Amino acid sequence: MALYLLYESASGYSLFLANGLDEIGQNTDAVRSSVADLNRFGKVVQLTAFHPFESSLDALNQCNSVSEGLMTDELRSFLELNLPKVKEGKKTKFSLAVAEPKLGSHIFEVTKIPCQSNEFVLELLRGVRLHFERFIKDLKPGDLEKAQLGLGHSYSRAKVKFNVNRVDNMVIQAIFLLDTLDKDINSFSMRVREWYSWHFPELVKIVNDNYLYAKLAKFIDDKAKLSEDKIPELTDILGDEDRAKEVVEAAKASMGQDLSPIDLINVQQFAQRVMDLSEYRKKLYEYLVTKMNDIAPNLASLIGEVVGARLISHAGSLTNLAKCPSSTLQILGAEKALFRCLAIANYLGIENRGNTPKYGLIFHSSFIGRASARNKGRMARYLANKCSIASRIDCFADRGTTIFGEKLREQVEERLDFYDKGVAPRKNIDVMKAAIESTQNKDFDMETEAPAVPSAKKSKKKKSKSEAAEDAEPMAEDKPTVAPNGDALEDAKSGKKKKKEKRKLEQEQAVENSNGLNGADAEQDGNAKKKKKKKSKDEDGEDVQPASDIKKKKKKSKSEDDE
């Protein structure tokens, strides 16, 4: 059976035919030893066809497809053109050797070309890669290295390409560091308590908070120097004057031993380190909250920033979490308990697996704690369902918004009320429709607010033009509109409104004095333009009557001349 080798290089696709494999044997070790010898390897493997890539972009697309195990149209046409045709119902007399098993399976599904991938094939392809420049005669020295370097850079750049504001790696590192800091701060705080308790053991019972204890240990230093003069400063640290007085009284009757100044200095330095770590932990938590609101706002608003970050970290990325079904998300973090339960059930031959864990990391959510003991499993299943929806929205949505997360949180609250009080919750389709409508309204408001600034600028320009016209040609009609206000810095919009109101008043007076023919139309029309037109018509009406008298006089003069 003939064996064809498909080799994907940075410059193009190449097809090799392996003949006389019996000479080097089918043994992998024999192939590995004979690959280095070009004379021997060149007799076995011969170039059949070569198809260069059109451009660097084409090479990148082909490389991405091959890495994902997909056969492109270009590769399919290349194989169908250079390989023997496969007839249906007949056994093929050749096979195609590929490096990627996924690519081979996809080629077989589409073209029915039999493919194989094993250690023997990989050794042959290694020899092809080693002597590839010798097979392609038109390649100049250094061309292949340049093509490989350029394709490697573009391929890596395409894989690493991301949105800076939506990098879930930062969340994963931050939550890992936050958990580590919690453990370290607790252990260091316990060490400060044990160390300083040799000197002032009564302080442990008075102050329970680790940060405040370290702060007091640094402030008090030597208990013998602690007096009532320092009660105001202790009150600022503790926030309670009674506790500050209690600390002073306990220091006077303390049973602790005295420490040397060097020992007290070391205790103070260590307490300062613990305080610095605690402050850094607060800053890191604020950073995590901001990053979660940028990356997964819906998941953060639904289940909280810390629990959501732990879910993303455990899944590996936000995309992996979005791909997980809700049943998997429900037990994330409880894999050991799940597999232990399944192993025991299989060992004992029990079909009923009722002791499987009901929740994993989502147990830290407040919703699970608020549910009753009999409803904790139901609540965990429902919450995992909503978390799965929120993670998919965050992963695949173009714009980040917290509306869906807030609506999903409302649903979880309604479900809690349903379990406790029996209040029927809303349907999911109604809640999602309301969320979509609110997002659309929010987008519409953002679009309408955007052109508000240029319109204000235009109104200011119009105002400046009108002011310039008033300065150039002052008219008696415009004086009343400016005189009552007397404000040169008034907004253009407010000035226009006042002018319109005054025009309305003038028009109403004109309508009352006229015959009332246009009164109904003036009351019905709400547009300012129509009112202006009607006003101009009323003003022109005064000039129409003398013009008619002139025409009548002309007609009379003509009739007198004819007589």
Image (spheres, rainbow, N blue to C red):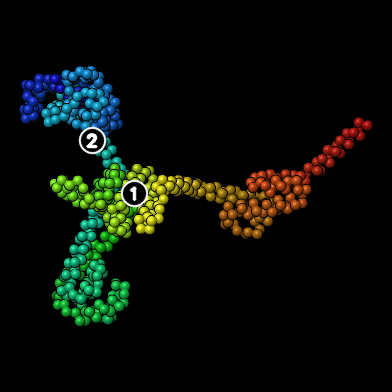
Q: Name the residue under label 2.
A: 152
Answer with left or right where residue 368 lies relative to residue 521.
left
Residue 240 sits in quarter: bottom left
| SS state under label 1 | helix
Amino acid type at mark 2: Gly
Where does the image place residue 63, in percent across and percent down from the top left?
25, 32
Answer with left or right where residue 273 lies relative to residue 528.
left
Q: Give me the C-alpha separation between circle 2 and circle 1.
A: 41 Å
Q: Name the residue under label 1.
A: 386
Where does the image place residue 84, in percent across and percent down from the top left?
21, 18
Foreground residue, 4 or 480?
4
| SS state under label 2 | helix
Residue 183 versus residue 404 in the image, above or below: below
Q: In which quarter of the image is the C terminus?
A: top right
Foreground residue, 388 or 214?
388
Q: Which residue is drawn at 8% across and 25% down?
A: 26
Where does the image place residue 2, in percent across and percent down from the top left?
15, 20
Amino acid type at mark 1: Lys
Where does the image place residue 385, in percent across and percent down from the top left?
32, 48
Residue 419 sits in quarter: bottom left
Q: Quadrant of the N terminus?
A: top left
